[in-house]
Amino acid sequence: MWGVLTKQQAHIRAQNITYSYFKFHPYTPTYFLFHFRKHQFDHGELVYHALQLLAYTVLGILIMRLKLFLTPHMCVMASLICSRQLFGWLFCKVHPGAVVFAVLAAMSIQGSANLQTQWNIVGEFSNLPQEELIEWIKYSTKPDAVFAGAMPTMASVKLSALRPIVNHPHYEDAGLRARTKIVYSMYSRKAAEEVKRELIKLQVNYYILEESWCIRRSK
């Protein structure tokens, strides 16, 4: 009986000593492991956004148009420069405003060169046949007349003449791609009557046929 009590007392005493040790000695390996896991959990979102930024970078390199996802996300990640949790060791020596100003100054060097390059470009775009076509559409057709044709031309018709169109350059939509395929069948070897039936189904009133597309060599 006394032996059992002695073992229990010894166990309780050991627990008290261990508790006192961790209470007065917080920088033990167990403390560091707990602190590391907690710190890692707190900044898990940074790991996620860093990996997402990497994925957007790869997509931007492979497909130029997808830079629209990379640019805003890169700006969001750049705002972490002002984070005291990540760069507190630097802000102890340097004021945060000085760091931001230094980064902006370094960026302005290349930015200024890009602006000078663009400002030095002097030119004028002129497409007289298309301008005459737009003028004819505006004054010789009804406002609800539907047009079809090459996508670059349709963009001008929609923007300048404000007429309904059945296809335009933003062809990521599956239905829009299908309509564009029908419209471009005018330049194929299909019979004219067959193409006309398909265009009537799309409620097309006018088709803009461009001669340059008729003689264009296919790849």
Image: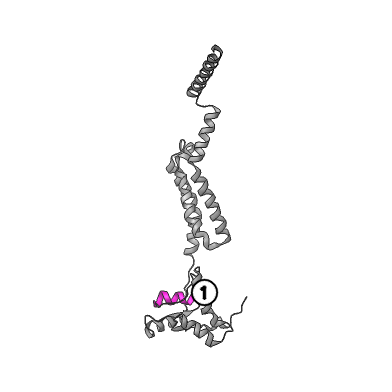
The residue lying toward the viewer, choosing from 80 and 17, is 17
- From the image, give the main secondary structure of the stretch colored magenta: helix
Q: Which quadrant is home to the C terminus?
A: bottom right
Question: Eyeballing the image, is 183 above or below 47?
Answer: below
Could you say where residue 189 lies in the image, as x and y percent from the top left?
Answer: 59, 84
Indicate yes or no whether the magenta region holds residue 157: yes
Range of residues picked out in magenta? 150-162
User: Does residue 8 show up?
Assistant: yes
Indicate yes or no whether the magenta region holds residue 32: no
Q: Is residue 132 left or right of residue 50?
A: left
**The residue under label 1 is which amino acid type?**
Ala
Could you say where residue 43 lies in the image, as x and y percent from the top left?
Answer: 49, 42
The residue lying toward the viewer, choosing from 132 and 204, is 204
Which residue sits at x=49%, y=75%?
Answer: 152
Q: Is residue 216 left or right of residue 141?
A: right
Kindly identify which residue carries mark 1.
178
Q: Residue furthest right?
A: 219
The residue lying toward the viewer, choosing from 7 and 168, is 7
Element assignment for label 1: helix
Q: Residue furthest front?
A: 1
User: Does residue 86 show up?
Assistant: no
